[in-house]
Amino acid sequence: MDSLLKRWGLQAYDVRPLTEGTNNTGYYVGDEFVLRIHRNAIAPTYEHAVLRALSGLSFAVPVPVPADGETALRGELNGQTVLASLSRRIPGEHPGRGDTASAEACGRALAELDHALARLDPTELPPPFVWDGDLTNVHPRVPSIDRVIDGVSAEDRDDVARILTGIGPRSDLPRQIIHGDFAMTNVLMAGGRVTAILDFETAGVGFRAMDLAVGRFFFGEVGHPSAAFQRGYLDAFPLTDAELSALRELELMREATSFVHWYGRYVDRQITAENLADRVERLRRVDDWASERR
């Protein structure tokens, strides 16, 4: 760890584990910095470009600290070569589930972020991820949906095939740069206000309404999206009737996209068969809920 931190000129810092997320592991470096070890198959080039381009927000985002002209550096950690990035620590705590005031405040903050993301000039950013329902473009280990269908257990195969083959791009909904993963663990709050939005690793071009679909899902439960979160978002960023009608479909699209990503991680032996089975069950539950409006 010391040799890695020296790349940023940091020495003699106390390092403490922070989190282990889906795509990265975090460490506090003293009380000033957060170090992320990226375990995704794709470097955070686009994520970092978006973070550096954002400005004028009422909350902070984890802008990467450069070293040697780079924002993501390769180094040694526990005998392995890893890809790491550093940002300044932002004060705050994650909101609690069921707190309607916090959910509404987080909805407003996401709406503010989406306004800012819409103002970014795509020509000044690297090529983006595109989250439009094309499930063959989610993970480099999954070039076709057939590989996912063939790879799940026999008892799950028919359901997975039915759900995944029913997902596809739409041409009638507005698109823009979106955050893509607005969960409670990706927000910090203090004194009733949002202090930071974190983890832009899935940022890319997608359906504008996807952020609301994802946020209200994570701030609620399967089948019971957070009305407070939706109210806060729509007060600051009204959507069209077509977008509002598509929210359930978009959440299923996002869940299917996430499932394909998890299958790619399964191929890379980053998760177990039991982890994958749990995601199959969640995919079924989201599909059941989305199907109520079809």
Image (tube, helix red, strand yellow):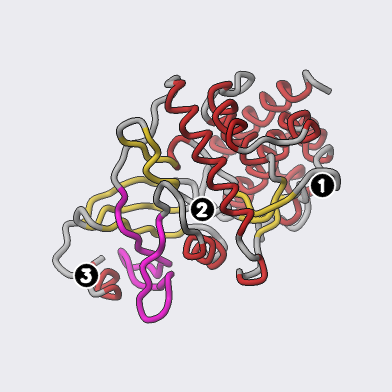
Residue drawn at the location 52% of the way across and 66% of the way down:
49
Q: Quick one: 153 or 275, which is closer to the camera?
A: 275
Q: Which residues are magenta?
A: 62-90
Q: Quadrant of residue 276?
A: top right
Q: Is residue 63 magenta?
A: yes
Q: Quick one: 254 or 20, which is closer to the camera?
A: 254
Local SS, label 2: loop
Residue drawn at the location 59% of the way across and 29% of the way down:
217
Local SS, label 1: loop
Where is mark 3, residue-wise? 10
Where is mark 2, residue-wise? 200
The reply to whether discs 3 and 2 touch (Cβ–Cβ < 8 Å) is no
Instruction: Answer with mark 1 or mark 2, whichever residue precedes in sequence.
Output: 1
Where is mark 1, residue-wise? 169
Cα–Cα span, label 3 and label 2: 25 Å
Instruction: Answer with mark 3 or mark 2, whichever residue precedes in sequence.
Output: 3
